[in-house]
Every structure is written in structure tokens, then in C-alpha cells.
Image: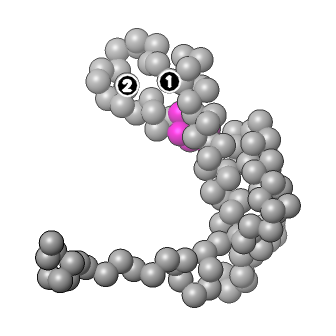
Amino acid sequence: MIPPAATPSPTAPPPAGAPLREAALRLEAAFLKEMLSAAGLGRPPGLGGGAGEAQFASFLLDAQALAMARAGGVGLAQSIVEALARQGTPAGPPPGGPAQPPRQPPTEASHAG
């Protein structure tokens, strides 16, 4: 019998910087998608798939680009993470919520001119 693969427990906290790393990976994936598209990999080869073929080609490019980024890509995500770490940028939003207070609706006095 093959033992099950080790998986992290659902209660384990994510590694430090996980949101930043994921955002950097998605940015690199978007860059790679544009590069793949410019290279002509997003165009259907004309195999008779109809209109749906062209629409779903973008989903294929999304998946390919994200897989490339997760496998190391061109190193853009890693460079972003390292550069932000050197600057001391926090990995996520501040614990107290958004940095700016919510905007207050205008009052009648602000419309008087």
C-alpha cells in the first residue's frame, strides 16, 4: 500500500509572506500570458473549433502562464518578493484594516457656495 502524501494541516498558518508571494506569482503569470499571446500561442490553429475555441484559448493561456510562473517562470516573482523584502514591505494588509479611513459622504454645508 502506498502511504498518503504529506499535506499541511488545515489549521497551520500560511508561511510568512504568502499573500505577497501569491500576488507576485500572479503578476508574473500576467506578464507571461502577454508574452505567450504576443508569440502567437493564444491563437487557435483553425481546427474547426468555432467561436468557442477562440474564447477558451485565453483560459488555456492563463493556466499555462500560471503554471510557468509557479515553476519558476522568468524569475520576475522572486525578484519582486526579494525587492519588497529588502524595503521592509509588509506581506499583507495592516492588522488594523485599511490604511485610510473610509470617506465620509458630503454634507449639505459642503454644497453651500
In the picture of the structure, the residue carrying the numbered disc 2 is 54
Q: Residues within 10 Å of mark 2 (few under 14, many from 20)?
A: some
* Residue at horizontal 56 percent and vertical 30 percent from the top: 34
If you read the primary sequence from the N terminus, does the residue marked by circle 1 or circle 2 appear first? 1
Of the 4 image quadrants, the one containing the C terminus is bottom left
Amino acid type at circle 1 is Gly
Q: Which mark is residue 42?
A: 1
Q: What colour scheme does the image use? A: one colour
Residue drawn at (37%, 25%) of the image: 54
In the picture, measured across the screen, residue 28 lies left or right of residue 57, that is: right
Q: Is residue 40 above or below residue 2?
A: above
Residue type beneath disc 2: Ala
Q: Depth check: give the residue in front, 95 or 34.
A: 95
Tell me: residue 60, above or below residue 26.
Answer: above
Q: Position of residue 17 (x, y in %)?
A: 74, 69
Q: Residue at x 63, y 34 (%)?
A: 32
